[in-house]
Amino acid sequence: MAMKQRLYDLLEGGNRATASQRAIDLWLGLLIVGNVLAVALESVARFHDHYGGAFAAFEIFSLAVFSAEYVIRLWVCTEHPPLKRLAPGAARRRYALSPFMIIDLLAILPSLIVSIIGVDLRFLRIFRLLRLLKLARYSPTIITLGRVLYGERRALFAVVIIMFGLLMLSASIMTIIEAEAQPQAFGSIPASMWWALATLSTVGYGDVVPITALGRMFGGVVTLLGVAMYALPIAIIAAGFTNESRRRDFVITWGMVARVPLFAKLDPVALSKVGGLLRSKSVPSGYEIAHRGQPADSMFFIVSGEVVVDIDDHRVTLEEGDFFGEIALLHDTTRRAHAYAVTECRLMQLMKSDFHGLMETEPTLRAEIAEVAAERLRQGEWSHGDIPDDEIKDQPLRGE
């Protein structure tokens, strides 16, 4: 079962952040691109004649890899958390009907059919191009595009209806204007639709053009309308990308905020407010986060990783869920500690102005931070903060 979990982690699990996961995704992505290029090059007669054997060997290798990938994904899918509550057979049936697995099956099925029946059905080769769709599994951008298209489907459908209506209207009017002068090209609405489609799309093949003055004037108007109409779906998709990016950033920030114990008691409204003030920051191992003597302009919350705070000969290690830098902000002093990342860290930074604003609007949060800071000082653990006890014991909290 350890191997099964390991294979699941490599192919399906996590956020694709480990080196082995990225390496597998990259290798499979390059293999997919190679297959698409092979299909294109194999259609050239001289390449097929000279390198037919190499193309065949590459196809067999690719088919073996993609088939093994499909079988392994189907085997390890029972480790997927949403499917663990199901029986193995039911879990695999449900997973096999997921969009990505259907694409994976269609990518190998035509080649398997050819291999089984032993007949080279050339029209099935075109289905090998479906392997290009497998890239969606390894590209967050393509997945985001799919979400955007699905989310904006109603608006895009409305645009399609409007564009079709404009196409019919343009063809109808041009039929009335040009039918007498060019009965073969504009004798009917269906015949005029070819000109309308080429003009609205601003392609302008030039095989069919109006010859009357009124027809040319109307053609210019249709061209301008086409530019405006094709801008509509582009604007809708661009706006959808922006909204999806904001939604993703909000979810990530919310998840990071929720992992900090200090914010556990906040209600959703306050948690959302805090998330809007925090700035996500990733730092590598060895990075100096705070420097002794510099003005205190922010405090930090540790989402993941390990941070060491040094004051003179005293050192404290902070981990996920801890925070530091609060004492200097509470007492408006400079930093007296060095803080640096021991490992790669994900931090959330709360700027000084936002900190004091939050303290004024969230008295519960202020009380908890002040309590933690006071407790650290009472226990002599001032290295969790920024300045030693004897420098701040006579200074009132800012705002009091």
Image (spheres, rainbow, N blue to C red):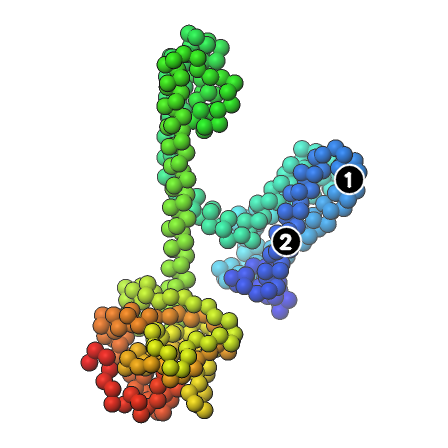
Which residue lies most toward the left here?
A: 400
The location of residue 345, given as percent across then percent down, is 47, 72
**Secondary structure type for disc 2:** helix
Is 15 above or below relative to 304? Answer: above
> Residue at (44%, 12%) from the top-left corner?
211
Quadrant where the N terminus is found in the figure: bottom right
Compute the Cα span from label 1 to label 2. 23 Å
Identify the disc placed on residue 28: 2
Residue 34 x, y percent position in the rendering: 67, 47
Of 254 and 85, the residue lying toward us: 254
Crowd rating for badge 2 (residues with CA inside 10 Å; few <14, some 14–19, many 20+): some
Instruction: Name the kind of residue labelled 2 in the image.
Output: Leu
> Where's the C terminus, which quadrant?
bottom left
Mark drawn on residue 52: 1
Residue 383, compared with residue 93, is above or below; it is below
Q: Within the image, what quadrant is residue 126 found in?
A: top right
Q: What number of labels is visible?
A: 2
- Closer to the camera, 294 or 254? 294
Report whether residue 88 is seen: no
Query: Which amino acid, mark 1?
Result: Gly
Near-viewer residue (234 or 211): 211
Label whose residue precedes the other's in the sequence (1 or 2): 2
In the rendered structure, the answer to whether residue 70 lies left or right of residue 311 reads right
